[in-house]
Image (spheres, grey):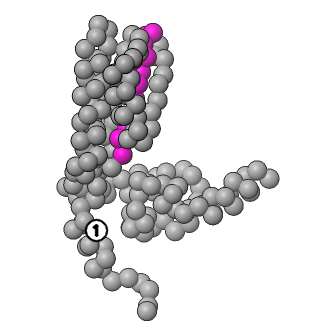
Amino acid sequence: MQNKNFENNANNKDFDEMLPDFSAEDFRTAGIQDPNEDLRTLGKQLEQVYRRRKDEDYIINLPQALRFLEAATFFSEASQEDGAQLMTASAVPKEERGYITAEFPVLYLCGEELKQFGKILMHAGALTIDATNTDKVCVSLNIPFVHQKNPEEMLQYRAEPTDRQE
């Protein structure tokens, strides 16, 4: 009975709410019609959509890119402590988000560092704090919309004829 309730709730949600990284055009191009398809099939189709994306179709979203740079700088400076390490700071255009991962022997923030970290978190899309098997603390976060689809690229979709008759 719970599965049926979940399915009904999923039907009531806007598809863009459920999967915000993919546009309606991405789904139409991949031939996805029913959001209630088997999850494995949907996952494979999402991979196809992602593979079709090209970095050159995306431009920098300056306000978010500056927030990503601020977060990357914060973690880079914080990882200068003994035993700390900045693992990843990446912003691939077609992924739209910027990702940062750092490991610390101890994560201790106070005063201005804590305020700055809070400011960074206000603009983060997700944050994880995990213990590693090497007795360190792994902090990962992403900043959404560091890149966005080029508006000129989006106009191309609007110029194409549709199947609907008006």
Observer-nearest residue: 6 or 63? 63
Label 1 packing within 10 angstroms: few (<14), some (14-19), many (20+): few
- Residue carrying label 1: 154
- Residue at x-position 54% and y-position 63%: 14
Task: Identify the residue at the far left of this view.
Answer: 56
Asked whether residue 55 is in view, the answer is: no
Secondary structure state at the residue bearing disc 1: helix
- Residue at x-position 67% and y-position 58%: 9
Task: Identify the residue at the far right of this view.
Answer: 1
Residue type marked 1:
Met
Observer-nearest residue: 161 or 147? 147
Task: Identify the residue at the far bottom of this view.
Answer: 166
Question: Residue 116: percent from the left, percent from the top?
Answer: 34, 28
Question: Residue 66: percent from the left, percent from the top?
Answer: 24, 41
Question: Residue 164: percent from the left, percent from the top?
Answer: 44, 86
What is the span of residues highlighted in magenta in the rendered image? 134-144
Asked whether residue 49 is in view, the answer is: yes
